Image: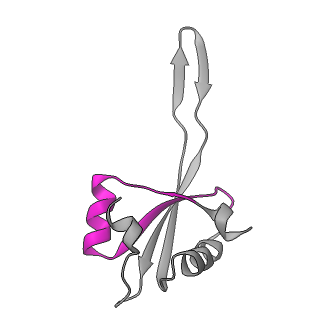
Amino acid sequence: MRETEVIRRPLVTEKTTLEREGVNTIVLEVAIRATKVDIKQAVERLLGSKVASVRTAISHGKVKRQGKFFGQRPDWKKAYVRLRDGETVPEFLEGA
C-alpha cells in the first residue's frame, strides 16, 4: 500500500484537538486495510515526524433510513498516532 493511500484525512474534533495539544497525538482516518506498520511508515515519510506508537480502532457505519428503505454507511478506521518526545505536530495540522 502506498503512503498516500494509507492516510485519508486528519480527524478534527474537540477531543482530538485536546489530544494533539496535551499528549502530542495526531488522530487520522486511515484505509481500512492499513496495518499499524503501514500507518507508522506513512506518517514518518509524509509528515516528517518520528512516531512512538500507533493505536487503531474500527468504527462501524451507522444504519440509516429514508422512508422504508434501509442502508448502511461504510465502516472506517481511525488511528491514534503518538509522536516521540521532542517531535512537533506539522504546521498544517495545527490550524485544523
Examine the structure image and report whether residue 25 is included in the region drawn in magenta.
yes
Q: Quadrant of residue 71?
A: top right
Q: Quadrant of the N terminus?
A: bottom right
Residue 56 drawn at (x, y percent):
52, 64
Up/down of 42 relative to 4, above or below: below
Residue 34 visible somewhere in the drawing? no
Would you say 34 lies left or right of 16 here?
right
- Height in image: 78 above or below 60? below
Q: Nearer the viewer, residue 50 or 32?
A: 50
Which of 69/96 is in front? 96
Q: Which residue: 37% across, 54% down?
A: 12
> Farthest residue toward the right?
1
Is residue 86 toward the left or the right of residue 39 in the image? Answer: left
Q: How is the image coloured?
A: one colour
> In this view of the protein, can residue 44 be seen by the observer?
yes
Query: Where, quadrant-wise, is the C terminus in this rendering?
Result: bottom left
Establish if 18 lies above or below 86: above
Q: Quadrant of residue 60?
A: top right
Identify the residue at image location x=57%, y=77%: 40
Instruction: In this rendered view, identify the residue nearer to me: 66 or 2.
Output: 2
Is 7 magenta? The answer is: no
Residue pushed farthest bottom?
86
Give the image location of residue 32, x and y in percent.
64, 55
What range is drawn magenta here?
8-34
- Label tally: 0
Q: Which residue is depicted at the point 52% across and 24% down?
A: 64
Furthest residue in direction top, as rendered:
67
Q: Give percent across and percent down for residue 43.
A: 55, 75
**Residue found 59% across the figure and 71% down from its top:** 39
Rendered location of residue 23, percent (x, y): 30, 75
